[in-house]
Image (tube, grey):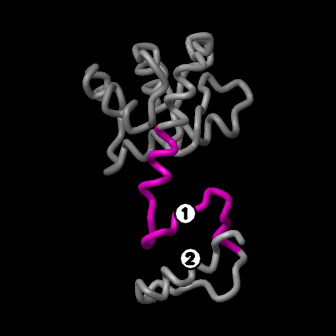
Amino acid sequence: MPEYRFIDYAEEVLKNASHPLTYQEIWELGLELGIREKLDTSGSTPEQTLGARLFVDVRDEPNSKFLKIGSNPARFFLKERENEINQELLDKISKDEDKHVKKKRLSPGFHVAKSVKLHNLDNPPTLGAKTGDLNQYYMNLQPK
């Protein structure tokens, strides 16, 4: 019998889901459904492993069984159930994403911009930088 993988776990859960779920919700629903025992893993963060496997599968597998919907947070659904996704559901997901982005504040009046890239920048703060230094650094990244 083939090994039961994290991808199999996600597929089984999403067959029972009524709507697209985050990888955390997939993990929790799988626990409720009692299918965690099928996974043979000794890792300390299986929920994170599930998320990583889903993201990589969607990104790298042209014949992936999964759809990634949205990005903040990303939700997953089965391609075979794509016809169940309607505009009302997409609008709700978009609204939830907007709420999630608004919660990410570094300091009053500054939101993390989705388009800001934090690599290849001059003088990035070090790990030991003071909070004020970090806030000023990120404030300077705001698009003009």
Examine the rendered structure and indicate whether residue 35 appears above or below residue 48. Answer: above
Residue bearing mark 1 = 112
Region of the chain picked out in magenta, as a range? 96-119
Q: State the residue in front, 69 or 103.
A: 103
Residue 25 versus residue 61: which sits nearer the camera? 25
What is the quadrant of residue 81 in the picture?
Answer: top right
Q: Is residue 90 magenta?
A: no
Callouts 2 and 1 close, C-beta under 8 Å: yes
Q: Mark 2, residues whose alpha carbon is within 10 Å: few (<14), some, or many (≥20)?
A: some
> Looking at the picture, which amino acid does disc 2 mark?
Tyr
Q: Please say whether residue 113 is one of the residues in the magenta stretch.
A: yes
Relative to residue 24, is residue 77 drawn left or right?
Answer: right
24 displayed left or right of 127: left
Residue of label 2: 138
Q: Position of residue 25 (x, y in %)?
A: 37, 33
The label on residue 10 is none
Determine the secondary structure under disc 2. Answer: helix
The residue located at (49%, 21%) in the rendering is 11
**As drawn, 144 above or below 58:** below
Image coordinates for residue 142, horizontal then vertical, percent: 64, 71
Q: Quadrant of the C terminus?
A: bottom right
| Label 1: few (<14), some (14–19) or many (≥20) C-alpha neighbours in 10 Å | some
In the image: residue 99, left or right of residue 143: left
**Mark 2 and mark 1: Cα distance apart in space:** 8 Å
Marks 2 and 1, the one that precedes in the sequence: 1
Q: Position of residue 141 (x, y in %)?
A: 64, 75
The residue located at (45%, 89%) in the rendering is 129
Please report the residue visible at 51 percent of the width from the left and 68 percent of the height from the top.
Answer: 110
Q: Position of residue 26 (x, y in %)?
A: 40, 30
Residue appearing at x 60%, y 33% in the figure: 68
Tag 1 secondary structure = loop
Residue type of the residue flagged with mark 1: Val
